[in-house]
Image (cartoon, rainbow, N blue to C red):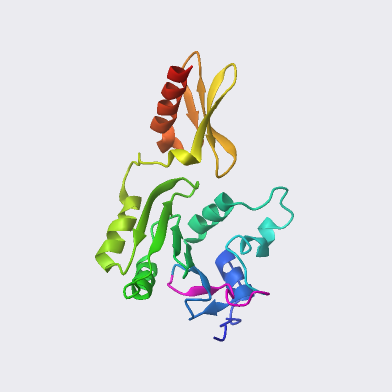
């Protein structure tokens, strides 16, 4: 299917820049992201020589050129949250980092409602923590609304422990976030004062539970 390119305006934000480079598509099999207005970003998935994976998208933006570290999933998740993008693959994967817009929900519904193929839905926050995971097949609009109502909760507690592990040195217990490969929380062993990075404050109770488990094991 022919790719659509809109050259009528100068790109003003990162999403517009990606549209300028990659174009839009009406073919759900070629799409990689659902934009806030429900349009589909073209990733040329059927062309083995030109297709791009979801991380390649960031490499096209000037802000990511010359980065010292490789682009990882948490970089992409933060970008998805910033630009309100839904990662989508017709093979059965959907990933969100913020609550979908009404037009994105409508696009998901019209795409999935009459498909028997199961889709794995991962719901993250902007920092990359997994808030919930679902498997859906032929969902109703109501079911989709319920799934993404996770973003309406003021607090989350059902985090994936597989994404975290406990580290320590002489002075601190440390909460290590595996997807971003970094420490996101510290607890002073003497004062028990805890400091959490922005985006990870909700993982405080998980941190305390891991500390308790680690102390008991010791």
Q: In which quarter of the image is residue 112?
A: bottom left
**Along the horizontal axis of the image, is 60 left or right of 212?**
right
Residue located farthest toward the left when viewing the structure as drawn: 142
Q: What x and y, as percent, mark residue 11?
A: 60, 71
Can residue 165 be seen from the camera position used here? yes
Q: Compared to 193, does 203 lie above or below?
A: below
In the displayed structure, 102 sits above or below 127; it is below
Instruction: Please name the residue shown 47% across and 66% down the image.
Output: 88
Q: Is residue 198 visible?
A: no
For this view, does 218 lie left or right of residue 131? right
Q: Quadrant of the N terminus?
A: bottom right
Residue plotted at (42% across, 42% down): 160
Describe residue 148's horizontal placement relative to residue 191 as left or right: left
Q: Quadrant of residue 19?
A: bottom right
Q: Decide if residue 43 is on the left or right side of residue 108.
A: right
Q: Where is residue 39 in the image (x, y as percent from the top left)?
A: 46, 75
Front residue of 213 and 193: 213
Q: Number of labelled discs? A: 0
**What residue appears at the point 52 percent right and 79 percent down from the top-left corner?**
25
Q: Which residue lies furthest to the top in this view?
A: 190
Q: Which residue is drawn at 27% across and 68% down?
A: 140
Residue 184 percent coordinates (x, y): 53, 35
Residue 63, by quadrant, is bottom right
Asked if residue 210 lies in the magenta stretch, the reply is no
In the image, which residues are magenta? 37-49
Image coords of residue 174 (percent x, y): 54, 27
Main SS of residues in magenta: loop
């Amino acid at each position: 299917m022919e790719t659509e390119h809109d050259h009528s305006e100068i790109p003003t934000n990162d999403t517009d820049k990606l549209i300028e480079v990659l174009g839009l598509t009406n073919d759900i099999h070629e799409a990689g992201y659902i934009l806030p207005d429900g349009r589909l970003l073209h990733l040329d998935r059927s062309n083995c020589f030109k297709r791009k994976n979801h991380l390649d998208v960031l490499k096209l933006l000037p802000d990511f050129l010359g980065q010292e570290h490789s682009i990882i999933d948490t970089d992409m998740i933060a970008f998805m949250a910033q630009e309100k993008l839904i990662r989508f693959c017709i093979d059965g994967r959907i990933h969100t980092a913020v609550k979908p817009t009404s037009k994105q929900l409508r696009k998901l519904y019209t795409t999935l409602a009459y498909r028997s193929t199961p889709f794995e839905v991962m719901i993250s926050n902007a920092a990359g923590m997994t808030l919930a995971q679902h498997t859906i097949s032929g969902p109703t609009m109501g079911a989709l609304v319920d799934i993404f109502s996770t973003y309406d909760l003021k607090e989350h507690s059902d985090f994936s422990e597989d994404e975290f592990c406990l580290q320590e040195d002489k002075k601190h217990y440390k909460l290590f976030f595996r997807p971003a490969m970094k420490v996101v929380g510290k607890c002073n062993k003497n004062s028990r004062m805890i400091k959490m990075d922005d985006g990870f404050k909700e993982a405080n109770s998980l941190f305390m539970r891991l500390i308790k488990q680690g102390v008991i094991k010791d």
